[in-house]
């Protein structure tokens, strides 16, 4: 019979369903640990026994192969073997199916009608229509995968081929195929990898270009794939950097087999066709070379060679910072950071940061619109790019060579950089920074060191942040020391001084008075904080703050992702405080849109804000960390004052209709301020709604009393009161908007989201945080919207990464809690949670929730019954897991049900394997000390120690529980008894016991008891010596 496996039970075997709903069992053999067949696998079985006395009948099966299919395939194979042999001429055939790799053929000879779709022509066996290895110039217009130069180009279903000959008869998945060829040359088919020997020349057919442009996949026969690395394909970097355009699939090239040490390794997953066991097998993929056809072997690069390499950031750096590259023959290239470009063209952070991917910021957003101010801080050397290097030196007995990318080096200049003179200004890259200073690399053979006090003129709270690896710095040479260590690449070590006061000594520098308001300057980033960037104007000691809101025209969440200390930036002075000697800058690209008119531009119009002569805006200091919120509040106060003045200027001779309209507005306002009571146990703004409602009622009552007493001024009073009320409402609204804008500007809105937009923005950046999803569910639950809360949970399960099992379980727990308290789908939710999580963990969480309900309800009968049933169900489902029995015991002991807990312990010992008994009994004894009887816990521990006297962990836990229970004398007696009577412990274990005893006496005993421990230890040592 033929069926499929519906259930694979590790205890019994595989259940197979076949025919009209019948189910049989393939039993699991005791000598084999794996299952007979995995779940959902189609299998052919033989019926061994049937028990018809039961309904449905019990059927015993044995797995076997399909004899009819095997016999049919054997007949076809015999017919093929008898009809064709390697080298026989088949004749003509017609194409029935075509793909870029293989063509299926139908022989025209009617005597071979049974071989329909069994004759195949592989791309490596086909004759190319054109001899090309590069794509033509118009290849971009061809959209088909079979392009000009492909052997199957212009072939289609129905095309007839002639002069076909058999080259192999292969078997694939119990099917036999005949491999044919239409080539006229002498074919040499390599059947196995073991037949490939190094330096053998073969003809390979290109099948595809590998991912990340690392090389080309080829086939030398229908069953053998090989790989040609890009470095072994060509020495032209133009071709290598665009392999997909440089080669055409189907082209045939001559290659040479490389040595096996250069072959690619691949882990292959192998599944047992009879069982469910899966193993991994290491396979080798042959590596070929086109360049080896023109040379004998790959030589190690030597000084002066011009070579091609591929940049690789995954290679471990040697004495960073270096740019690492792959070279031919498994050699590695190491390009010093000072050899990336000429000295005059050095840039800051040429290799980027070690972690330069922005977190929490959209990488595709244009943070700075001005091209000159874009600062992505990513390396200009693209990973995987092929470049040309000049070899400077090789490392003895090491596959790493020093290379250079300097244009002068590529032209042939191999001379090392000269040692600078005393007092000369030099530039270099920071190698490493520590609390004592930093090291700077000036060239491949020159390094410098700077002590902490000479890094800058000011105080550095964190030198490593201000001077990261790769920063371009300038310093003055103080001293030169020659390196005396042998085999050291660094020839000289220089002492440098990087303080600007020393570097610019004797030069005229800008002063504070020289810097004017709205003037533009070039500056250097000195420090980065959460609230802004500190910069220093070039050729001066003038420093200031660029507030976070002035760093870009767009919102920037994390400044450290876009700026580094040492970056050169453009700034404009927007504030200058002569008394405090403080300056505020702006780096917004809009200030530099037109540099010719920059002196007339202003970041903010003076007619919009009251700007003092010194740059302050109503006393708001731009250097303050809460500058944005203060500025927003100032603007809001100005608007409120203006609106009050407009309301007070309202004339008193308005018509009666206006008065009636005001009264209507007042009634509408009362309706708006009176919100529905949606309090469901959460405080999510309901108090503000209710307070607003009560306040409106009291004001209306007061107005009615005033209207009765002052009849003559009724209309004017209504108009004035309505204006004041509208102004107060506007002030309140504007304050809320201002507060919200400030929170969005400084990033604190994510700490306490209040609206759906806040939650959606927060989840867009951190979708795997269960806390955010649970708070979002609580937000909807506070609005009495259960359906929306359930939808949020469903979204969480879809959005969260499948690896975040614990985070998903937290969301499931929140959903279960919600259904338990307010919903009606608790049992259904448990089933769904078990399908998507570890069922044991789900039941432990559910039992914990029900246990909490029992405590909150004061042991109500319904809650206790529900928790008991769930505990019993959990122990029944997971009877071989000790954690479920421990959880049930804890629940019973907390409720004072000691007899039931003791009976449960007996059941647990029967159900659990023997190796889990010790841990269960130890945990139960600890629970007795904490929740039950100390005497019963002591009895259990004594029984365990009598059976397992060498378990020091049991002794130490026993002592700790005695101490925690206040039984100091019992703990002391236990330690003394164990150390005096124990004979099965070795010296190391006894030493641990005596140390434990001494620490105990040190904390709870006296000097006499401590001396007693020492005497006992001495006696033990003397006794063991004898």
Image: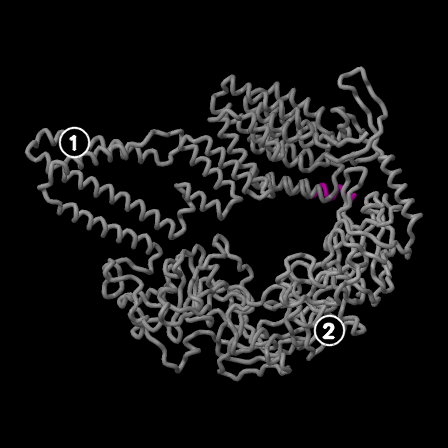
**Viewer-nearest of discs 2 and 1:** 1
In the picture provided, is 106 more to the left or to the right than 533? Answer: right
Question: What residue would you read off at disc 2?
Answer: 396
The residue that appears at 62% across and 23% down in the rendered structure is 873
In the picture provided, is 522 more to the left or to the right than 941? Answer: left
Quick one: 591 or 620, which is closer to the camera? 591
Quick one: 140 or 60, which is closer to the camera? 140
Residue 613: horizontal and vertical position, in percent?
Answer: 23, 66
Question: What residue would you read off at disc 1?
Answer: 702
Question: Where is the N terminus found, in terms of image quarters?
Answer: top right
Which image quarter: residue 70?
A: top right
List the single residue furthest toward the left.
712
In whole angstroms, how far apart are the C-alphas of marks 2 and 1? 97 Å
Q: Does 676 sit above or below residue 523?
A: above
Which image quarter: residue 713?
A: top left
Task: Residue 575: say if magenta.
Answer: no
Q: Are marks 2 and 1 in contact (CB under 8 Å)?
A: no
Counting residues from the start of the chain, the first of labels 2 and 1 encountered is 2
Q: Does 513 sit above or below residue 821?
A: below
Which image quarter: residue 505?
A: bottom left
Quick one: 1022 or 186, which is closer to the camera? 186
Q: Secondary structure at mark 2?
A: loop
Q: Tell me the crowding category of disc 2: few under 14, some 14 to 19, or many 20 or more residues within 10 angstroms, Cα based.
A: few
Residue 402: horizontal and vertical position, in percent?
Answer: 66, 73
Magenta residue span: 1018-1026
Looking at the image, can residue 121 be seen?
yes
Q: Tell me the crowding category of disc 1: few under 14, some 14 to 19, or many 20 or more residues within 10 angstroms, Cα based.
A: few
Looking at the image, can residue 29 be seen?
no
The secondary structure that most of the magenta stretch takes on is helix
In the picture provided, is 170 more to the left or to the right than 749? Answer: right
């Amino acid at each position: 019979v033929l069926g499929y496996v519906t259930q694979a039970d590790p205890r019994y075997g595989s259940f197979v369903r076949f025919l009209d709903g019948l189910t049989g069992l393939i039993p699991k053999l005791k000598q084999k640990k794996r299952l007979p067949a995995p779940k959902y696998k189609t299998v052919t079985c033989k019926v061994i026994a049937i028990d018809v006395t039961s309904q449905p009948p019990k059927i015993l099966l044995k797995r076997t192969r399909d004899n009819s299919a095997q016999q049919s395939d054997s007949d076809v194979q015999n017919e093929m073997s008898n009809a064709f042999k390697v080298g026989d001429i088949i004749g003509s055939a017609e194409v029935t199916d075509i793909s870029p790799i293989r063509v299926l053929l139908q022989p025209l000879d009617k005597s071979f009608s049974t071989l329909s779709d069994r004759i195949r022509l592989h791309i490596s066996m086909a004759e190319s229509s054109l001899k090309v290895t590069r794509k033509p110039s118009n290849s971009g217009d061809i959209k088909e995968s079979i392009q000009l130069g492909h052997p199957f180009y212009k072939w289609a279903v129905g095309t007839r081929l002639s002069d076909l000959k058999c080259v192999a008869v292969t078997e694939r998945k119990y099917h036999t195929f005949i491999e044919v060829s239409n080539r006229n040359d002498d074919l040499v088919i390599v059947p196995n990898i073991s037949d490939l020997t190094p330096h053998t020349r073969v003809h390979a057919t290109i099948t595809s270009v590998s991912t990340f442009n690392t090389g080309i996949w080829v086939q030398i026969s229908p069953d053998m794939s090989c790989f040609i690395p890009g470095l072994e394909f060509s020495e032209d970097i133009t071709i290598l950097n665009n392999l997909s355009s440089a080669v055409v699939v189907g082209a045939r090239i001559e290659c040479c087999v490389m040595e096996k040490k250069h072959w690619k390794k691949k882990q292959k997953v192998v599944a047992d066709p009879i069982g469910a066991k899966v193993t991994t097998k290491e396979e080798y993929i042959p590596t070929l070379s086109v360049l080896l056809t023109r040379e004998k072997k790959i030589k190690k690069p030597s000084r002066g060679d011009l070579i091609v390499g591929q940049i690789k950031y995954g290679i471990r750096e040697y004495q960073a910072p270096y740019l690492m590259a792959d070279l031919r023959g498994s050699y590695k290239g190491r390009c010093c950071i000072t050899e990336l470009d000429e000295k005059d063209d050095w840039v800051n952070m040429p290799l980027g940061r070690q972690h330069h991917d922005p977190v929490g910021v959209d990488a595709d957003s244009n943070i700075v619109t001005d091209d000159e101010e874009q600062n992505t801080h990513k390396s200009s050397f693209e990973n995987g790019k092929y470049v040309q290097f000049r070899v400077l030196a090789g490392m003895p007995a090491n596959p790493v060579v020093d290379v250079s990318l300097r244009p002068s080096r590529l032209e042939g200049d191999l001379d090392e950089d000269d040692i600078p003179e005393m007092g000369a200004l030099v530039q270099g890259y920071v190698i490493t920074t520590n609390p004592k200073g930093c090291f700077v690399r000036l060239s491949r053979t020159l390094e410098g060191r700077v002590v902490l006090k000479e890094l800058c003129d000011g105080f550095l709270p964190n030198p490593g942040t201000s001077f990261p690896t790769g920063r371009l710095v300038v310093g003055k040479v103080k001293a030169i020391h020659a390196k005396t260590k042998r085999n050291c690449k660094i020839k000289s070590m220089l002492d440098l001084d990087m303080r600007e006061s020393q570097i610019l000594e004797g030069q005229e520098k800008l002063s504070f008075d020289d810097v004017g308001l709205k003037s533009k300057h070039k500056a250097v980033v000195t420090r980065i904080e959460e609230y802004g960037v500190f910069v220093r104007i070039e050729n001066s000691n003038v420093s200031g703050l660029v507030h976070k809101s002035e760093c870009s025209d767009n919102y920037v969440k994390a400044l450290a992702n876009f700026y580094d200390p040492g970056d050169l930036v453009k700034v404009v002075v927007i504030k200058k405080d002569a008394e405090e000697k403080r300056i505020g800058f702006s780096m917004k690209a809009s200030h530099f849109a037109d540099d010719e008119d920059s002196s007339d531009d202003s970041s903010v119009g003076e007619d919009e804000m009251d700007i003092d002569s010194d740059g302050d805006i109503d006393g708001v200091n731009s250097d303050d960390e809460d500058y944005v919120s203060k500025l927003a509040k100032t603007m809001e106060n100005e608007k409120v004052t203006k609106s009050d003045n407009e309301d007070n200027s309202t004339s008193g001779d308005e018509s009666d209709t206006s008065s009636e309209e005001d009264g209507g507005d007042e009634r509408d306002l009362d309706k708006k301020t009176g919100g529905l009571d949606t309090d469901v146990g959460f405080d999510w703004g309901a108090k503000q709604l209710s307070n607003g409602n009560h306040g409106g009622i009291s004001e209306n009552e007061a107005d009615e009393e005033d209207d009765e007493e002052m009849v003559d001024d009724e209309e004017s009073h209504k108009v004035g009161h309505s204006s004041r009320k509208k102004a107060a409402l506007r002030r309140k609204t504007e304050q809320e908007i201002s507060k919200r804008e400030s929170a969005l500007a400084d990033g604190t809105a994510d700490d306490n989201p209040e609206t759906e937009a806040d939650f959606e923005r927060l989840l867009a950046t951190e979708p795997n945080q269960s806390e955010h999803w649970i708070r979002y569910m609580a937000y909807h639950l506070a609005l009495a919207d259960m359906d929306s809360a359930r939808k949020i949970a469903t979204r969480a399960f879809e959005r969260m990464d499948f690896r975040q099992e614990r985070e998903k379980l937290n969301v499931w727990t929140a959903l279960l809690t919600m259904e338990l308290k307010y919903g009606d789908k608790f049992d259904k939710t448990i089933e769904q949670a078990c399908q998507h999580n570890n069922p044991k963990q789900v039941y432990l969480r559910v039992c914990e929730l029900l246990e909490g309900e029992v405590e909150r309800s004061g042991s109500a009968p319904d809650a206790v019954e529900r928790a008991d049933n769930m505990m019993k169900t959990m122990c029944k489902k997971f009877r071989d897991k000790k954690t479920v029995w421990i959880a049930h015991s804890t629940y019973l002991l907390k409720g004072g049900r000691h007899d039931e807990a003791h009976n449960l312990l007996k059941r647990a010992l029967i159900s659990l394997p023997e190796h889990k008994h010790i841990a269960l009994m130890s945990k139960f004894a600890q629970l007795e000390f904490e929740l039950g009887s100390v005497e019963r816990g002591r009895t259990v521990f004594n029984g365990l120690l009598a059976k397992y006297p060498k378990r020091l962990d049991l002794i130490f836990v026993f002592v700790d529980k005695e101490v925690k229970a206040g039984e100091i004398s019992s703990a002391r007696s236990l330690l003394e008894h164990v150390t005096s009577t124990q004979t099965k412990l070795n010296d190391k274990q006894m030493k641990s016991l005596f140390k434990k005893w001494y620490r105990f006496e040190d904390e709870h005993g006296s000097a006499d008891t401590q001396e007693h421990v020492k005497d006992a230890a001495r006696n033990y040592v003397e006794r063991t010596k004898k």
